[in-house]
Amino acid sequence: MEKLERFFGDYSWLLKTGIWILLIFWAGQLFTPIKVATLENIDFYEKRDFAAEKEANREIDLLVAKLIMKAQEKGDDYSPWDYFEDLKEIDKKKTVVGEKLGYSFSYGFPHKLMQLLDISRKNIGKKFTWSDVESATDSYHKWLDSGTKYREELCANVKEKGWSESLKCLLNWAMVLYSRAFFLVILLYCVRMSERKGILETILAGKAKFLLSVLLWPVFLFRYPFSIVREIRVEAELRRFGEFFRRLSTEEKIMAQEAAQREDYRNWIRQFRLINGHFFERTLFAALIPAVLMYAFSPVMELSFAQEAVQTRDGPTITEAVSAFQEIESGHIGQENDNGNDYPQGTDIEAPIIQLITFMPSITVKVFWDRFPCRIVVQEIEHVPIFRLF
């Protein structure tokens, strides 16, 4: 078992990547549709007749030019109904040309259709109103729906088979997904357990919970043996200050893991915001982006960080702020210092700010900013702190 756990620990990133690929494409039954769609696209492009498409575009272009001339002759009398009647004529022409080609194609000069729209739009407020536009638009959409052969066939099939058939297909897909992913999820659980307390230790500590997590894996996939969603949520809070894609320190990772397992998890979040809210540099939504990406691509990130481990310390972090929060968590909440600020006694408020200012700028960002043509406009914008939005 020790050798197995050591293997899982050494190649956890590779195993988890492979498991997720199998879960999504094999168990999720996405591989076959993607393969079929790809082959159909390749076959379609091989059969395309570009010379015939060019001639078809020329025919439609002549029709559009003719309709534009008629619209210009009408002038103020060109109504929304006239505009949509012209669109109908163009659609009919595209259908005829598509039948000759054997497939549908897109008109290559859609900007010319805007001339018809401009002529009609200029007359709104003179002889026609927006209610006329809405009426003509509804009439056009009804014509499209009634003339769509695919839509009529689809509605007929749904009516004939009923929703029970569709529900049956959905249930079959779900059963295949559940059965295929069953053993993959067990393997994923084992990899996760080997990264923390160990496989046997975790299973023996909660046999019923392990059995329930396996049987109801769709519910516990991101919650066993630890809550991944909560850890990402806590890491996002930690990433609301400091560099956007900074590496979390060992102390911060342990804090995220411990906070995610707490019963008063939400209260922990509130306390953390209360103490560190003054240092937040971005919203929770913005901080979730690097948190999710770092978790999803942690193998690549860890390999990159491992190459720098000899020359750098354990990531630029907010050590003072974290230490301050730990002091607050131990029972010093709400104490005011001599200056009247709502901070724990003995907390150096300026240290985290100085540290953040030290790590935030980089040579790359500075060079880009110096050459950014709109930096003056950006500097003139009145920036408002938005960390209180979440």
Image: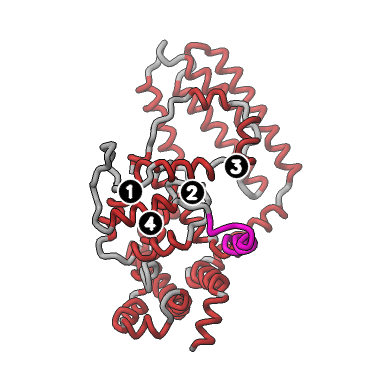
The amino acid on which the numbered mark 2 sits, given as a three-letter code, is Lys
Crowd class of label 3 (few under 14; some 14 to 19; many from 20; radius 10 Å):
few
Crowd class of label 4 (few under 14; some 14 to 19; many from 20; radius 10 Å):
many
The amino acid on which the numbered mark 3 sits, given as a three-letter code, is Ser
Magenta residue check for 100: no
Q: Position of residue 266 (x, y in %)?
A: 27, 56
**Can you say whether 242 is above or below 339 in the image?**
below
Query: Which circle's residue, 1 or 2, is located before the other in the chain?
Result: 2
Magenta residue check for 302: yes
Q: Nearer the viewer, mark 1 or mark 4?
A: 1
Crowd class of label 2 (few under 14; some 14 to 19; many from 20; radius 10 Å):
few
Q: Which residue is mark 4?
A: 234
Query: Which circle's residue, 3 or 2, is located before the other in the chain?
Result: 2
- Who is closer to the viewer here, 137 or 313? 313
Q: SS at mark 4?
A: helix
Marks 3 and 2, Cα distance to the nearest angstrom? 59 Å
The amino acid on which the numbered mark 1 sits, given as a three-letter code, is Gly
Residue at x 59% of width, y 23% of height? 67
